Image (spheres, rainbow, N blue to C red):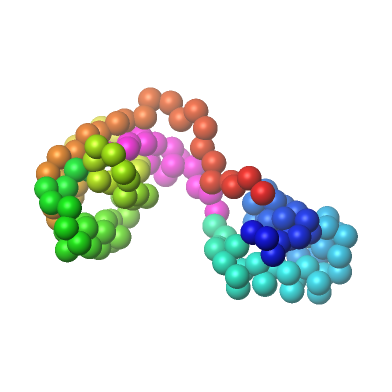
Amino acid sequence: MTDLDRIDLKILRLLQDDGRLTNLKLAESVGLSATAVLARTQRLQRDGYITGYEARLDPHKLGRGMLVFVEVLLDRTTPNVFEAFKAAVQVRDEILECHMVAGGFDYLLKTRMADMAAYRDFAGSVLWQLPGVRETRTYAVMEEVKHSSRLPV
């Protein structure tokens, strides 16, 4: 992060607040010309600081109100089992996030379902059928206290 100056950081903060901010509004906010801000924004994208833009959707309105985390323990921790598991997870839209972790299990999954019945169907038809799965532990979220994808910049 050493090649970012205070204006770059301000651009990143502003775009995290509102990814739909126009280039002109962004330029006004940081005190540069629209051309200069466009060049900086393009550089931030090219250098991988900005990885994309997306709309945040309300999962409750879309029938995916139940948030579930799942610990997954694999039967073997070999490269081919890891690769097969990762490939299978990539194609499942119900799995929002998958993280390999250190500790008492191998992966932590984040999923969203309509309700517990939908999760039960998912567990039986998808989750327990993933390559290498030996054991799972499910944590249904009762209350989402904080949700953010914002990084402190």
Residue at x 29% of width, y 31% of height: 139
Quarter placement of the N terminus: bottom right
The overriding secondary structure of the stretch rendered in magenta is loop
Farthest front residue in view: 2
Residue at x 65% of width, y 67% of height: 44
Asked where in the image residue 63 lies, by quadrant, the reply is top left
Label tally: 0
x then y, percent, for residue 22 = 74, 62
- Classify 99 as above or below 11: above
Residue at x 68% of width, y 60% of height: 2
Name the side, left or right, on which 146 lies relative to 89.
right
x then y, percent, for residue 92 = 28, 56
x then y, percent, for residue 73 = 19, 43
Can the viewer see residue 67?
yes
Asked where in the image residue 131 lies, by quadrant, the reply is bottom left
Assess whether residue 67 is covered by the magenta stretch.
Answer: yes
Can the viewer see residue 109?
no
Decide which of 144, 105 is in the foreground and name it: 105
Assess whether residue 8 is covered by the magenta stretch.
Answer: no
Residue at x 69% of width, y 64% of height: 3
x then y, percent, for residue 106 = 25, 46
Decide which of 135, 126 is in the foreground and name it: 135
Asked where in the image residue 39 lies, by quadrant, the reply is bottom right
Name the side, left or right, on which 80 lies relative to 58.
left
Q: Which residues are magenta?
A: 55-70
